[in-house]
Amino acid sequence: METVDAIKKIVDANNAIIKTADLSALNIYYHSIQKLLQKGMLRKIKHGYYCLAEHADGMSEAALVAQLFPDGVLCMYSALFYYGYSNHTPLAWDLAVDKDTSKARFDLDYPYVKPYYLEPSQLSFGITEADYGDCEMAIFDRDRLICECLQYENKMDREIFNSAIQNYVKDSKKCIPNLLEYAKLRRVKEKVRQRVGVWL
């Protein structure tokens, strides 16, 4: 019982996620972890990451992603869907991350996360917060998102790309000065002129 209480304290301090290292600090090692899993007290999220079973059922997928990848920024299809620029439900959580982030972090069956590796300097602007009810996640703002779509235009579904541009142009919350500033930093200024400028 003391073990469970100690785990709960760590879980509460880490917003429901507990790592193997946290358990080791409590002198809870592999065999004990396996017993807790078998008893249904712990639930494995991915290698080295667990949560209490009682928390798992009430945790949204967004909250789980936010806990596992606090350094990630929602981008591409996930961000387009969030802003209503696309009505296609994303097949994965698209996250922009530092290019030096370990690829092993994304090796998990659930939730499915697709990383976009960027230079650290490219993760320092055009970021705001997305409200998912039980959590907040970092997300590229509308203007930065369109620059990302232009950056990855050749890899995007053509219908979704065109819908994104059209919906951005109609969006009263867009900020053209920001768009131009971000376009310069992302080296897509000419694409902004060609793809977006003709509609403004």
Image: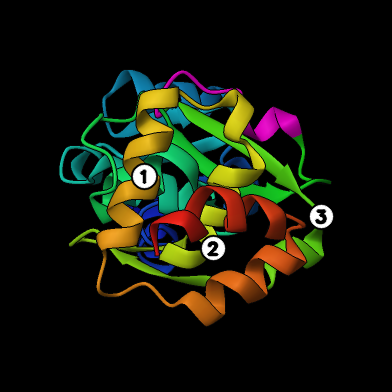
Please report whichever mark, 2 or 1, sits nearer to the chain's N-terminal start.
2
- Asked whether residue 1 is in view, the answer is no
Q: In this view, does 156 lie above or below 182?
A: above
Please tell me how crowded label 2 is: few (under 14), some (14-19), or many (20+) other residues with Cα within 10 Å: many
The Cα atoms of the two marked residues, 2 and 1, are separated by 12 Å
Please tell me how crowded label 3 is: few (under 14), some (14-19), or many (20+) other residues with Cα within 10 Å: few
**Magenta residues, start to end:** 103-111
Is label 3 or label 1 in front?
1
- Asked whether residue 130 is in view, the answer is yes
Q: Nearer the viewer, residue 140 or 180?
A: 180
- Along the horizontal axis of the image, is 54 left or right of 22? left
Q: Which residue is drawn at 41% across and 64% down?
A: 142
What is the secondary structure assignment of the residue under circle 1? helix
Quarter of the figure with the C terminus: bottom left
Q: Residue at x 76, y 44 (%)?
A: 101
- The colour scheme used here is rainbow
Amino acid under label 3? Glu
The Cα atoms of the two marked residues, 3 and 2, are separated by 15 Å
Residue extending furthest toward the bottom? 177
Q: In which quarter of the image is residue 126?
A: bottom right
What is the secondary structure assignment of the residue under circle 3? loop
From the image, tell me which residue sits under label 1. 164
Amino acid under label 1? Ala
Q: Residue at x 35, y 64 (%)?
A: 12
Please report whichever mark, 3 or 2, sits nearer to the chain's N-terminal start.
3
Q: Where is residue 194 in the image (x, y as percent from the top left)?
A: 59, 50
